């Protein structure tokens, strides 16, 4: 294995272990000393990969976003694609909620990470375009006049709310079986378009193209930005 591949493999191990420690901590913070001890590395080795703990956290979030994108790229029926969208938040709610909290904290208080945030948002915009394709196809299959924008927002709301509920130490005592609750959320998302039947056979989603154009414009602005 070349040195470059060794470096990449070690970086992946660092990210995986850091994510595991974050989830185990529950409070969205770890120490680099504990991370180095778990990996049996010198603390200075970590700084060869990441200039700060905040950069490490953002790299974990980018890695997570890339994993979600790969799942969304699975090319099968639209209904399965929609179900995966909601399952991504409900399957590991602790991870979804924790990484979102860390991202919001970094965006609000940390400087010097503009380039990495640009990388994160670029991956997220690519994933959004894929989600828009899946949603639009499903709405067409269901002959629904629910707009892509409203359906996408509804999926995020149910997913985020469901993840918060599943991750709550208080409400978990009253939830019953978590698997049946997840199934109920997925069923709600899949059945939602049927409550907005289209009058005509041909369904026109006027804001889908507007959404795609907005994403393309933002992506072009990102490519032309010097960080």
Image (cartoon, rainbow, N blue to C red):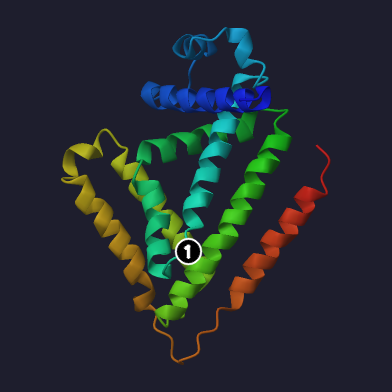
Image quarter (top left, top right, bottom left or bottom right) of the C terminus: top right
Q: Nearer the viewer, residue 36 or 107?
A: 36
Q: How many marks?
A: 1
Q: Quadrant of residue 220?
A: bottom right
Indicate left or right for 182 with 152 as reference: left
Q: Nearer the viewer, residue 206 or 130?
A: 130
Image quarter (top left, top right, bottom left or bottom right) of the N terminus: top right
Q: Image height check: is 227 above or below 179?
A: above
Residue drawn where x is 56% and y is 61% of the image: 130
Residue drawn where x is 67% and y is 60% of the image: 215
Residue under numbered circle 1: 75
Circle 1 SS class: loop
Indicate left or right for 36 with 112 as reference: left
State the image coordinates of residue 76 (x, y, percent, origin top left). 43, 66
State the image coordinates of residue 120 (x, y, percent, origin top left). 63, 42
Q: Image height check: is 185 above or below 50?
A: below
State the image coordinates of residue 194 (x, y, percent, origin top left). 35, 77
Outermost residue on the front side: it is 1
Q: Nearer the viewer, residue 151 or 201?
A: 201
Q: Image height check: is 145 above or below 65?
A: below
Residue drawn where x is 58% and y is 25% of the image: 11
Is residue 38 in sight in this rendering? yes
Is residue 150 in sight in this rendering? no
Residue drawn where x is 35% and y is 64% of the image: 189
State the image coordinates of residue 197 (x, y, percent, origin top left). 39, 83
């Amino acid at each position: 294995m070349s040195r470059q591949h060794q470096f990449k493999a070690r970086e992946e191990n660092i990210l995986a272990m850091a994510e595991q420690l974050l989830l185990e901590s529950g409070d969205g913070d770890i120490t680099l000393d504990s991370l180095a001890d778990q990996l049996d590395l010198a603390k200075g080795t970590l700084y060869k990969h990441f200039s700060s703990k905040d950069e490490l956290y953002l790299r974990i979030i980018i890695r997570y976003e890339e994993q979600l994108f790969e799942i969304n790229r699975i090319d099968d029926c639209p209904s399965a694609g929609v179900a995966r969208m909601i399952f991504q938040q409900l399957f590991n709610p602790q991870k979804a909620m924790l990484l979102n909290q860390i991202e919001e904290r970094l965006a609000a208080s940390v400087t010097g990470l503009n380039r990495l945030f640009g990388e994160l948002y670029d991956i997220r915009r690519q994933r959004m375009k894929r989600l828009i394709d899946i949603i639009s196809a499903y709405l067409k299959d269901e002959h629904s006049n629910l707009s892509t924008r409203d359906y996408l927002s509804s999926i995020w709301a149910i997913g985020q709310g469901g993840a918060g509920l599943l991750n709550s130490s208080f409400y978990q005592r009253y939830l019953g079986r978590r698997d049946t609750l997840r199934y109920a959320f997925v069923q709600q998302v899949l059945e939602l378009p049927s409550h907005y039947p289209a009058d005509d056979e041909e369904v026109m989603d006027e804001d889908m193209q507007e959404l795609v154009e907005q994403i393309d414009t933002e992506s072009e602005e990102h490519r032309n930005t010097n960080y």
